[in-house]
Amino acid sequence: MVTFDSVNEYLRFEVNGRLFAIPMSSIVIILQATEPVKIPEFPDYIAGTVTYEENIVPVINSRLRFGYPDTQITNRNIIIICEAEGKVAGILIDTILSFKRLAEGELKPPPNLNDDASSRYLSGVFMDEGDVPCYVIDLFKMFNESDAHIIPDFKRDDGTDNEEEE
């Protein structure tokens, strides 16, 4: 029997030529990027919304969230619908690279530059092929920092919220 241990499995992707990763356990679905529907008065890094399984999902433009220049959406762009602690949102990225399984001890704490740097959205870093750093995104921080009211709670297929029942 094959088991899937998503705890140490990550999806690697690129944003502005830099490597990032998110835990496989947080991914709901991966979609070919389409132009999100713009919403007035949302922060500039919220690209808009997309519809997934009859739910309207906000999409974070990772380029703008990390302080990189924006670009046009192309057929290489992807929207990763993710869930973190009951919140669901899409992340617009440049391109998916591959999946990576980390061995014990490969994930290190993120660099601590200052409170204003994008490192505040990171949970760790590992060295990728060719000794290139790959930064693991902390989705909970990315989703909740100042816009918790924009990111809806995730609803399961049965219509209930994703919080544990007592």
Image (spheres, rainbow, N blue to C red):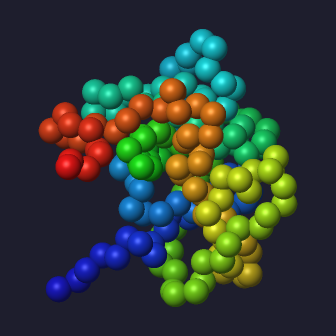
Q: Is residue 53 above or below residue 2?
A: above
For the question of whether residue 73 can be seen, the reply is no
Tell me the quarter of the picture where residue 42 sits.
Answer: top right
For the question of whether residue 124 can be seen, the reply is yes
Residue at figure coordinates x 74%, y 81% from the top left: 131
Tell me the quarter of the picture where residue 64 sits.
Answer: top right
Residue at figure coordinates x 51%, y 27% from the top left: 150
Residue at figure coordinates x 72%, y 81% from the top left: 130
Q: Which of the pair 64/159 is nearer the observer?
A: 159
Q: Position of residue 113 (x, y in %)?
A: 84, 60
Q: Position of residue 143 (x, y in %)?
A: 55, 41
Q: Which of the pair 165/138 is nearer the observer?
A: 165
In-image side of 68 versus 139 (left or right):
right
Residue at figure coordinates x 73%, y 45% from the top left: 66
Q: Is residue 46 above or below residue 32?
A: above
Q: Position of residue 90 (x, y in %)?
A: 48, 40
Tell me the quarter of the picture where residue 1 sits.
Answer: bottom left
Residue lying farthest to the top in this orientation? 40
Q: Position of residue 7 (x, y in %)?
A: 41, 72
Q: Which of the pair 100/26 is nearer the observer?
A: 26
